[in-house]
């Protein structure tokens, strides 16, 4: 594998742009190669419990080769999520899963190696599998429900009442069987009415972050004085925007992935992503249905860096949590940041910010104020959580 990675790097070297570290570039090649290798070769090693002619195993479902590039990105992240959830299992369960599905050891071999009865191995392994299935919404018969990651992007516009009917139906069917997503909806429905925006002719921005699951909803309202002319131009091309037109252009750091963008009425705006630098990406609209004079962009991001920070500090200090978030919009605006805190949190202390809003299923630390072009808005807090 090392030889293959070095050969790929050698062949790709002419395309290397010296605006970042060579080590990072080489590690990306290695990471892509290893992901592809194990996706092709490890299905037999990790068949999480159920597979027949009608249903794949959980891992087989997550690592399907018959995927579009966008679907493959989502499913690669799901595989990483499976590994993360395995790492959170109790030590003995984690060992049994590793022996059983990574090393293909029999129940008897695991019993001998761990010096525990075969019945204990069977029951503990079964319980671990059921825990994983519950987290990923796969029932005990193998039927696959819509993954939470596929429904996350609709939860804010659903709670906001600006969702299209077909998407509304999907959300309502999903939250009937998913307590986690239902809790998010309940919290957002209570939070949104408390949010105060700027006047219509002023810029408004907000970000609602859910650190535990690496999810962020943002909203940005700006004015299009010539919106009627833009709408006529859109109608002529049936909403398909040429690459040369950078309408609805914005940037974000590479610690995030944009999942979706919606307009005032919940119509999805198709976005095209560009590599802007080593640390930032830029997006522009490639298809949009409507333009409004006071246009709201509701964006959904997967924020990997904030979730990694949350997981790391959970291990370092299991009962004490701290959070910090900042943003510089680069324009005079009314800006607000909200971060979700578990409802069981106690002794919440706001170092920088306005306070805490209790929304039943979650609490939100927040900061909300007007800022100038140069100002950075910051939110810093801590809380105790007895597990």
Image: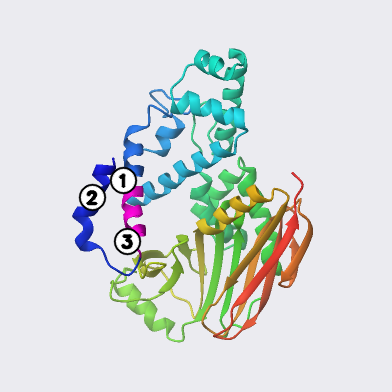
The magenta span reads: 21-33
Which of 118 and 272 lies nearest the eye of the viewer?
118
| Residue 321 at x, y percent in the picture | 69, 56
Q: Earlier in the sequence, mark 2 or mark 3?
A: 2
Q: Are marks 1 and 2 in contact (CB under 8 Å)?
A: yes
Which of 385 and 73 lies nearest the eye of the viewer?
385
CA gap between label 1 and label 2 equals: 9 Å
**Residue 333, placed above or below residue 286:** below
For mark 1, what is the residue? 33
**Residue 167, placed above or below residue 268:** above
**Quarter of the image containing the C terminus?**
top right
> Mark 1 falls on what kind of element?
helix
What residue is rendered at 52% in x and 28% in y?
97
- Colour convention of the picture: rainbow
For mark 3, what is the residue? 22
The quadrant holding residue 65 is: top left
The quadrant holding residue 339 is: bottom right
* Residue 274 seen by the camera: yes
Which numbered circle lies on residue 244? none
Q: Earlier in the sequence, mark 1 or mark 2?
A: 2
For mark 2, what is the residue? 8
């Amino acid at each position: 594998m090392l030889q293959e990675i070095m050969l790929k790097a050698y062949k790709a070297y002419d395309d290397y742009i010296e605006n970042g570290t060579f080590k990072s570039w080489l590690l990306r090649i290695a990471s892509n190669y290893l992901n592809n290798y194990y996706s092709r070769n490890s299905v037999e090693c990790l068949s999480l419990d159920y597979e027949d002619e009608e249903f794949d195993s959980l891992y087989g479902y997550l690592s399907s080769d018959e995927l579009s590039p966008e679907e493959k990105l989502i499913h690669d992240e799901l595989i990483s999520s499976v590994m993360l959830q395995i790492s959170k299992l109790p030590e003995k369960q984690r060992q049994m899963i590793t022996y059983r599905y990574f090393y293909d050891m029999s129940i008897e071999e695991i019993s001998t190696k761990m010096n525990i009865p075969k019945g204990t191995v069977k029951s503990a392994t079964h319980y671990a599998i059921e825990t994983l299935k519950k987290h990923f919404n796969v029932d005990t018969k193998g039927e696959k429900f819509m993954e939470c990651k596929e429904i996350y992007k609709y939860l804010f516009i659903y709670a906001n009442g600006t969702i299209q009917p077909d998407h509304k139906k999907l959300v309502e069917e999903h939250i009937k069987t998913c307590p986690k997503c239902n809790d998010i909806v309940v919290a957002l429905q209570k939070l949104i009415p408390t949010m105060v925006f700027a006047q219509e002719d002023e810029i408004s921005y907000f970000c609602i972050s859910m650190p535990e699951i690496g999810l962020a909803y943002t909203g940005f309202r700006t004015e299009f004085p010539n919106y009627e002319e833009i709408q006529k131009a859109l109608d002529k091309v049936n909403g398909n925007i040429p690459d040369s037109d950078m309408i609805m252009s914005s940037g974000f750091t590479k610690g995030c992935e944009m999942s979706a963008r919606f307009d005032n009425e919940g119509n999805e705006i198709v976005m095209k992503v560009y590599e802007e630098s080593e640390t930032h990406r830029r997006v522009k609209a490639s298809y949009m249905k409507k333009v409004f004079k006071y246009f709201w962009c509701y964006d959904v991001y997967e924020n990997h860096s904030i979730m990694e920070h949350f997981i790391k500090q959970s291990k370092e200090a299991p009962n004490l949590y701290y959070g910090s978030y900042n943003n510089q919009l680069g324009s005079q605006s009314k800006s607000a940041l909200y971060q979700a805190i578990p409802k069981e949190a106690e002794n919440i202390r706001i170092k920088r910010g306005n306070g805490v809003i209790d929304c039943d299923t979650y609490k939100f630390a927040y900061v909300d104020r007007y800022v100038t072009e140069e100002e950075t808005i910051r939110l810093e807090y801590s809380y105790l959580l007895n597990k």
